[in-house]
Amino acid sequence: MIQNLHKRKTGATSGFTIIEVMIVLAIAGLIMLIVFLAVPALQRNARNTQRKNDVGAIASGIANYIDNNGGTLPASVGGTAPNLLICGANCTTGNTETAKLGLYDPANVTVQTSATLPAANADAVVIVLKDTCNATNTGVNAAGSSSRSAAIVYWTENGSGTPPTQCTEQ
């Protein structure tokens, strides 16, 4: 009987030590930190990709409008999400082209003839008629530099600060 008690006390114990548990928790915490830091950047990149796709759809719609209207530039935009109507003076009459948007609200897409851009807004798109993008595609040239083109200005998200300006031409 005494030998059985002695064997129980000196036998190997099963389970984890507190050090092993702490190491596993530290590694799990490090993995969670990396994930929490990476997810917002991935989401931001996905939104920026959708912005670029939407601007491409707008540029295509403007090009179609110009081709179908004898070289005339569109004068306005309208529509309800997700469809942006690209049209003349009145979007309810005449020829219109449609651009399907994934991220932007058509209410945040404006047409202007001035090269003066509004404040940076990652939720907005500005179509500057009769204009082209500058050499770095970060802004527009003087309005009136091209009679049959339009510069489409939009802003992308970055990690901090003012959203960078992007420009593409139809």
Image: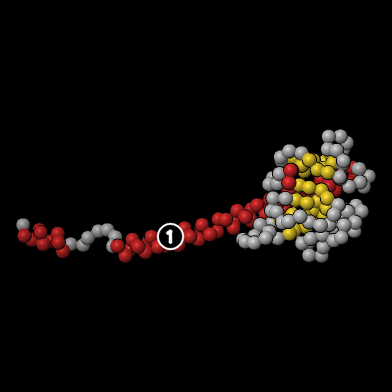
Horizontal relation, residue 167 to residue 24: left or right: right
Q: Nearer the viewer, residue 157 or 17?
A: 157
- From this viewpoint, is residue 133 visible? no
Q: How is the image coloured?
A: secondary structure
- Residue 154 x %, y %: 74, 54
Residue that protrudes farthest toward the right in the picture: 70
- From this viewpoint, is residue 45 visible? yes
* Above or below, 140 relative to 67: below
Q: Residue at x 75, y 58 (%)?
A: 166
Horizontal relation, residue 69 to residue 121: left or right: right
- Residue 165 x %, y %: 73, 59
- Residue 29 x %, y %: 43, 60
- Residue 35 x %, y %: 51, 57
Q: Nearer the viewer, residue 72 or 15?
A: 72
Q: Give the quadrant of the N terminus.
A: bottom left
Q: How many dots with numbers?
A: 1
Q: Residue at x 87, y 41 (%)?
A: 88
Horizontal relation, residue 65 to residue 47: left or right: right
Q: Nearer the viewer, residue 114 or 147?
A: 114
Q: Residue at x 76, y 39 (%)?
A: 79
| Local crowd size for mark 1, using a 10 Å CA cut-off: few (<14), some (14–19), many (≥20) | few
Residue that protrudes farthest toward the top in the picture: 93
Q: Secondary structure at mark 1?
A: helix
The quarter holding residue 101 reads top right
The quarter holding residue 41 reads bottom right
Callout 1 amino acid: Gly
Q: Which residue is mark 1?
A: 29
